[in-house]
Image: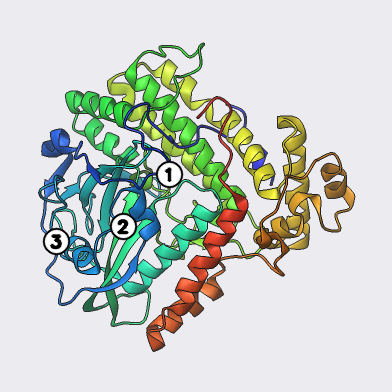
């Protein structure tokens, strides 16, 4: 199964990186700039809630790299615990947390009874590039949308999210950042892991928490005015290049948003595939309109190149298997198109949706060359290179991280179809010492379990911190992922 043939022509805009105003010089420390832009929408977008009163708050993880990007790295540990364990409001920010309301398709079954059941939107601020960023929680207590859940998060789940986000960031995926993990001193009962187990509250830094499911809810309520406001909010705070010049009804805000989301989702799908990553639960309530991956549950990295590999034990039909992820994100974009029918005609929405396939193929080719460390040659030869690499991995049952590392810059004993495909490619200049390591970094389930076992059995956090340092070093070696042509 070829990555570039998963979708018939019917990837894409990378996430937005800057604004024309309010930029800070890259060498200057970023100052904290609160901007609770969501407050005018709060009356219909969410419900004010209070965080749980946890028995204790023990700081286990603070992401000072992410905190520095929004001017919060200077907080003392005591202040950190007060804001991200007890959830005292940040100065000038959202006065009460908001549990967001949304609907969604869960494994293709529509569910109107969901929303933030164990999390909330806590704060919003600008980063040094002027982007609006959110601080949202996971495991912060019950909300009106908790249903029968306890609103809590296991410490293991929090550790797994640290590992997932750090690995994805190192591989160029547009992902939320695990900002904070605080152990909360409760013994949780869970049916899918040994219980009782330790508890935690997690804070993520994310470029929005507006989901496709947010729009689906407004459609279900026939809330046309609120949807118009939300479209304008998204275009104002998550801007994107305009649609193609020949796009029908391209000046309609709903159409502009549709094109932006299709571009972002096509690139996100490509980034998952090139990373060898399986998200596991690609429901529409887990789809951020900024194209940023978030909400990590039963994720896995491929042990071998296998399109049918699934991450979730409950995904019996393989709906979100590795090779079906592009199809899933395309389908989810279709649900956004259905919702936006409140403000646009069908034909221009379909025209935007039909761009997904070509954008996805271009994004795969672009990202594949980047990870392989070769200069791209154009969509046709790059697509042939991808196909040759896939064949090599599939026939040899090769692990993707090992494959890309072994053949970085065209090195390695490549013969046959792969050797022929690589022959015409020039390597990029690789000077980082990571490329001389004996083996690449990876994130297979055995290592994840080993890192957790050290914490669970001996309260030893050293393996986790060592892994994060190694992943960040790998990220430095790769450098930033490539932008689509015409996107700054």
Identify the disc placed on residue 73. 2
- The residue singled out by tag 3 in the image is 51
At horizontal 29% and vertical 50% (from top left) the residue drawn is: 71
Q: Are marks 2 and 1 in contact (CB under 8 Å)?
A: no
At horizontal 35% and vertical 15% (from top left) the residue drawn is: 252
Q: How many marks?
A: 3
Name the N-terminal-most of marks 1 and 3. 1
Residue 4 is situated, as x and y percent measured from the top left of the image, at: 66, 38
CA separation in Å, label 1 and label 3: 36 Å
* SS category of the residue bearing label 2: loop
Label 2 or label 1, whichever lies nearer to me, is 1
At horizontal 37% and vertical 42% (from top left) the residue drawn is: 288
* SS category of the residue bearing label 3: loop
Residue 480 is situated, as x and y percent measured from the top left of the image, at: 56, 45
At horizontal 45% and vertical 23% (from top left) the residue drawn is: 241
CA separation in Å, label 3 and label 2: 23 Å
In this rendering, the answer to whether 130 lies above or below 166 is above
Say if residue 318 shows up in the picture: no
Residue 191 is situated, as x and y percent measured from the top left of the image, at: 33, 75
In this rendering, the answer to whether 416 lies above or below 167 is above
Say if residue 221 shows up in the picture: yes
In this rendering, the answer to whether 427 lies above or below 145 is above
Q: Is residue 297 left or right of residue 429?
A: left
Label 1 or label 3, whichever lies nearer to me, is 1
- The residue singled out by tag 1 in the image is 27
Q: Residues within 10 Å of mark 1 (few under 14, many from 20)?
A: few
Q: Residues within 10 Å of mark 2 (few under 14, many from 20)?
A: some
Residue 129 is situated, as x and y percent measured from the top left of the image, at: 38, 37
* SS category of the residue bearing label 1: loop
Name the N-terminal-most of marks 2 and 1. 1
CA separation in Å, label 2 and label 1: 16 Å
Q: Residues within 10 Å of mark 3 (few under 14, many from 20)?
A: many
């Amino acid at each position: 199964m070829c990555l570039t043939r998963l979708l018939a022509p019917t990837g894409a805009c990378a996430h937005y990186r800057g604004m024309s105003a309010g930029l800070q010089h890259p060498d200057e420390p970023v100052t904290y700039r609160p901007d609770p832009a969501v407050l005018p929408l709060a009356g219909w977008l969410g419900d004010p809630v209070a965080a749980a009163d946890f028995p204790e708050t023990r700081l286990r993880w603070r992401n000072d790299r992410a905190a520095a990007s929004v001017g919060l790295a200077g907080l003392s540990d005591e202040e950190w615990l007060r804001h991200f364990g007890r959830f005292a409001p940040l100065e000038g920010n959202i006065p009460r947390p908001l549990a967001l309301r949304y609907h969604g398709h869960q494994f293709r079954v529509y569910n109107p009874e969901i929303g933030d059941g164990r999390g909330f939107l806590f704060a919003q601020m600008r980063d040094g590039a002027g982007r609006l960023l959110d601080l949202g929680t996971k495991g912060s207590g019950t909300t009106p949308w908790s249903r029968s859940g306890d609103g809590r998060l296991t410490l293991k789940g929090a550790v797994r999210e640290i590992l997932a986000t750090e690995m994805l960031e190192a591989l160029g995926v547009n992902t939320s950042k695990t900002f904070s993990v605080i152990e909360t001193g409760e013994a949780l009962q869970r049916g899918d892991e040994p219980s009782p187990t330790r508890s935690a509250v997690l804070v993520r830094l994310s470029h929005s928490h507006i989901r496709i499911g947010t729009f689906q809810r407004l459609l279900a309520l026939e809330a046309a005015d609120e949807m118009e406001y939300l479209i304008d909010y998204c275009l104002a705070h998550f801007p994107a290049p305009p649609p193609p010049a020949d796009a029908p009804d391209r000046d309609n805000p709903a159409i502009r948003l549709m094109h932006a989301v299709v571009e972002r989702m096509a690139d996100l799908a490509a980034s998952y595939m090139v990373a060898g990553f399986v998200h596991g639960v690609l429901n529409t309530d887990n789809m951020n309109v900024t194209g940023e991956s978030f909400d990590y549950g039963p994720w896995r990295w491929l042990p071998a190149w296998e399109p049918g590999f699934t991450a979730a034990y409950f995904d019996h039909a393989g709906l979100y298997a590795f090779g079906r992820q592009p199809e899933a994100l395309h389908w989810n974009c279709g649900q956004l198109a259905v919702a936006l029918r409140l403000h646009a005609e069908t034909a221009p929405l379909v025209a935007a949706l039909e761009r997904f396939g070509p954008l996805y193929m271009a994004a795969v080719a672009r990202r594949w060359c980047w990870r392989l460390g070769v200069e791209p040659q154009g969509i046709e030869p790059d697509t042939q290179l991808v196909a040759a690499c896939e064949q090599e991995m599939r026939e040899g049952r090769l692990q993707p991280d090992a494959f890309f590392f072994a053949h970085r810059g065209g090195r390695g004993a490549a013969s046959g179809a792969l050797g022929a495909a690589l022959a015409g490619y020039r390597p990029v200049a690789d000077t980082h010492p990571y490329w001389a390591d004996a083996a690449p970094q990876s994130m297979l389930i055995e290592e994840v379990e080993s890192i957790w076992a050290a914490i669970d059995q001996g309260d030893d956090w050293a393996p986790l911190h060592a892994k994060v340092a190694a992943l960040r070093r790998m990220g430095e070696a790769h450098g930033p992922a490539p932008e689509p042509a015409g996107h700054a």
